[in-house]
Amino acid sequence: MNKPGTPTRVVSWNLCWRFGGDWRQRQPRIVTQLQTLAPDIVGLQEVWANDTVTQADILAEHR
């Protein structure tokens, strides 16, 4: 939690937008971009998921 008066950085990102190709190839670039932006809150759109894991789960491992 930020101290009162400290800005909160919010990122909303449609992951299908910028990086084309296979998700396995895209994932490192997505992680790098999020680490560079260093958001406090992230909203993700058009992410992949299967029966056991979501892309958000994987990205959260890189916080």
Image (cartoon, helix red, strand yellow):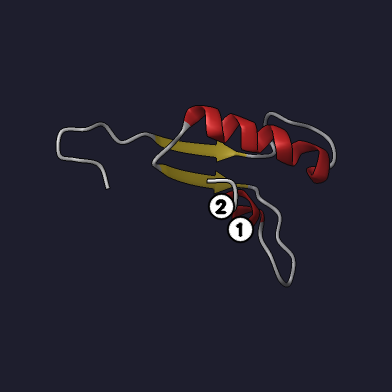
Position in image of residue 33 (x %, y %): 60, 30
Residue carrying label 1:
57
Q: Is residue 46 left or right of residue 5?
A: right
Q: Residue at x 71, y 71 (%)?
A: 52
Residue carrying label 2:
60
Q: Residue at x 71, y 54 (%)?
A: 48
Query: How many labels sit on residues?
Result: 2
Q: Is residue 13 left or right of residue 25?
A: left
Q: Is residue 14 left or right of residue 9?
A: right
Say which element carries label 2: helix
Q: Residue at x 70, y 60 (%)?
A: 49
Say which element carries label 1: helix
Rendered image quadrant of residue 9 = top left
Q: Residue at x 63, y 38 (%)?
A: 31
Seen in the picture, residue 56 relative to 21 is either above or below; the reply is below
Position in image of residue 62 (x %, y %): 59, 46
Q: Give the label on residue 14, or none.
A: none
